[in-house]
């Protein structure tokens, strides 16, 4: 099993439509850089990617999170309905940790691709799929952590404005 890495300089998209039943993701900055993983697919609710689809996928997953100085525990996998359909999100670990290791696996031993296909096929719709199915885990950036609101560039801009104002008065 390969370990994928979410970091400041790495990719934020992870192919979830894969022929494996287990994946590990090392997350640098859970809660500080990244808030959660969100499952996105190119299927619409009319093509079967309804709230029930996301609930079936969530029910077929087991996700654990390991952080330094904390015991391994189950990560929260949540499905929230909204006006556009639904969102399946996976927690990445506590904000106080600099790194976490997420292990995602299917409960039934099927591949992630099979879990997605079976969950889509359970929805009977008159619409046909005209393109190959895609399913991605997207790392959603964190926005609520205090460090995000005081960047080094903001400090440089403030200093530049202060020195410009002093030059005007000289």
Image (cartoon, grey):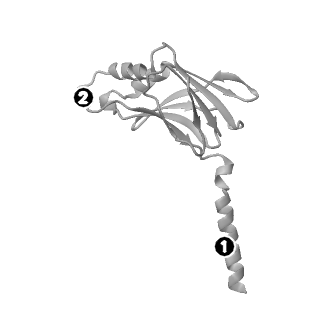
Sort mark 2 into few (<14), some (14-19) or many (20+) by Cα contacts within 10 Å. few
Say which of 86 and 63 sits in front.
63
Find out whether the residues at labels 1 and 2 contact each other: C-beta distance under 8 Å. no
| Badge 2 element | loop
| Badge 1 element | helix
Sort mark 1 into few (<14), some (14-19) or many (20+) by Cα contacts within 10 Å. few
Relative to residue 127, is residue 114 drawn left or right?
Answer: right
Q: Which residue is mark 2?
A: 127
Position of the N terminus, as image quadrant, is top right
Relative to residue 135, is residue 26 drawn left or right?
Answer: right
Name the spot of residue 168 as percent of width and height, x first. Answer: 68, 84
Say which of 142 and 111 sits in front.
111
The residue furthest top is 108
Position of the C terminus, as image quadrant, is bottom right
Relative to residue 165, is residue 88 drawn left or right?
Answer: left
Name the spot of residue 93 as percent of width and height, x first. Answer: 64, 32
At 29% across and 33% down in the image, what residue appears?
A: 131
> Does the image show residue 94?
no
At 27% across and 29% down in the image, what residue appears?
A: 129
Q: Quadrant of residue 141?
A: top right
Question: Mark on residue 161?
Answer: 1
At 67% across and 78% down in the image, what residue appears?
A: 164
């Amino acid at each position: 099993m390969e370990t994928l890495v979410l970091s400041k300089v790495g990719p934020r998209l992870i192919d979830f439509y894969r022929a494996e039943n287990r994946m590990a993701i090392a997350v640098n900055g859970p809660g500080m850089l990244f808030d959660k993983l969100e499952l996105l697919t190119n299927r619409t609710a009319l093509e079967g990617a309804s709230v029930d689809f996301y609930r079936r996928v969530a029910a077929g997953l087991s996700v654990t999170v390991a952080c330094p100085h904390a015991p391994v525990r189950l990560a929260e996998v949540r499905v929230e309905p909204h006006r556009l359909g639904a969102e399946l999100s996976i927690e990445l670990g506590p904000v106080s940790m600099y790194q976490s290791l997420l292990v995602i696996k299917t409960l039934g031993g099927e591949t992630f691709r099979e879990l997605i296909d079976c969950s889509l096929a359970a929805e009977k719709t008159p619409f046909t799929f005209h393109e190959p199915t895609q399913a991605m885990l997207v790392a959603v950036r964190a926005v609520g952590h205090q460090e995000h609101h005081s960047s080094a560039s903001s400090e440089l801009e403030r200093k530049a404005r202060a020195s410009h104002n002093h030059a005007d008065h000289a």
